[in-house]
Image (cartoon, helix red, strand yellow):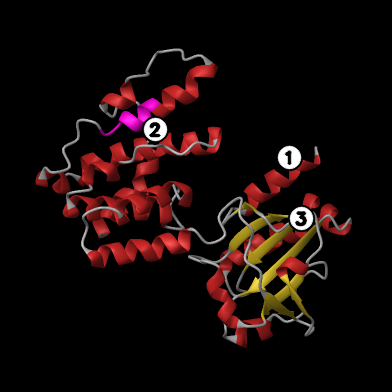
Amino acid sequence: MKKLLLFISIIIAVASCSNSGNKAGNSHQGIQIPEADKKAHLMNMANGFWYGIDFSDSTLFEQEQQFMPAFAQWADMALALYYEYGEIVSKTPVELTMNNSKALVWLMNIADECFRNPNSPFRCEELYIPMLEAAINSNADDLYKEVYQERLAKALKNRKGTAAADFSYITENGETGTLHGIHAKHTILYFFNPDCHDCARVSEIIGNDSTIREMAGSKQLSVLALYPDKDMTAWNKHFGKWPKEWITARYADLAEKEKYDLPAIPNIYLLDENKTVVLKDAAIEEIIDHLNSRTK
């Protein structure tokens, strides 16, 4: 697994390499594709990428160094389809390993590190979900299927386009409320820990960004900064240090923490006025870009 993590850390560099030698990667070099045909071309390339790969070949598992750049190229195409066209690739390599438990588990470990790991540049639950669904319907051992079912259940929580799960909170001043009780056109739901280094960076950005400040000042946007842990030491240490415009709170009932999957902190959602998830586990920069696009 350490070797796998090493390769995952470098695939972002090799994914764009034009001389990888991969047939699918070279098939479009030098060809000018009309804009109207790009989506179909990309989908065809992604769907056909794995044809010819023999996942029953046991030596494949010994060739991670050659396999990982290929997986990165496929992931890059799948991500382009999703983010540029809102399309999910219809063929994944999992379909080719449905009857080969060893190959499937090996492949799902790679997919997990690419699409689920919060530190991966390829992180995208929407691409991971169909792979999990396929793995659950495979011939893998029941023990692995249970793991995939647990991961799928987490990935399905609060998906983009669905209603964010409601919960009760209690603020620094002891006031109570609910997520769905917040009345604003946009809500930034910001799971944070006051002692988290990256949270300090994100908090500074949220507190100083002109768009957020302007929208919050005009009541178009609310920021709910939620501390999700039971240890009150950090909470009490930073009491009263947050912007007054924010709703800085903790769970009124910590059991409601299970309503959200928090693989890492900070974890930020953008919700619309109906509390529908617009962005999930997004970078604060992505959220600000989205808000700016709505104010133009």
Q: Residue 105: which quarter of the image?
A: bottom left
Magenta-highlighted residues:
44-50
Please tell me which residue is depicted at 44% across the width and 63% down the height of the picture: 153
Q: Is residue 288 left or right of residue 258?
A: right
Task: Give the alpha-carbon distance from disc 1 to disc 2, as whole Å.
Answer: 28 Å
- Which one is in front in this view, the residue at disc 3 or the one at disc 1? 3
**Would you name the residue on which mark 2 appears?**
16
Is tag 3's residue or tag 2's residue first in the polypeptide sequence?
2
Is tag 3's residue or tag 1's residue first in the polypeptide sequence?
3
**Would you name the residue on which mark 3 appears?**
273
**Amino acid of disc 1:** Ser
Q: Badge 2: few (under 14), some or many (20 or more) residues near its Cα, within 10 Å?
A: some
State the SS at label 3: loop
Q: Badge 1: few (under 14), some or many (20 or more) residues near its Cα, within 10 Å?
A: few
Q: Residue 207: which quarter of the image?
A: bottom right
Task: Give the alpha-carbon distance from disc 3 to disc 1, as whole Å.
Answer: 16 Å
**Would you name the residue on which mark 1 appears?**
293
Q: Quick check: can you spot residue 157? A: yes
State the SS at label 2: loop
Q: Quadrant of the C terminus?
A: top right
Q: At which x and y percent is residue 267?
A: 58, 62
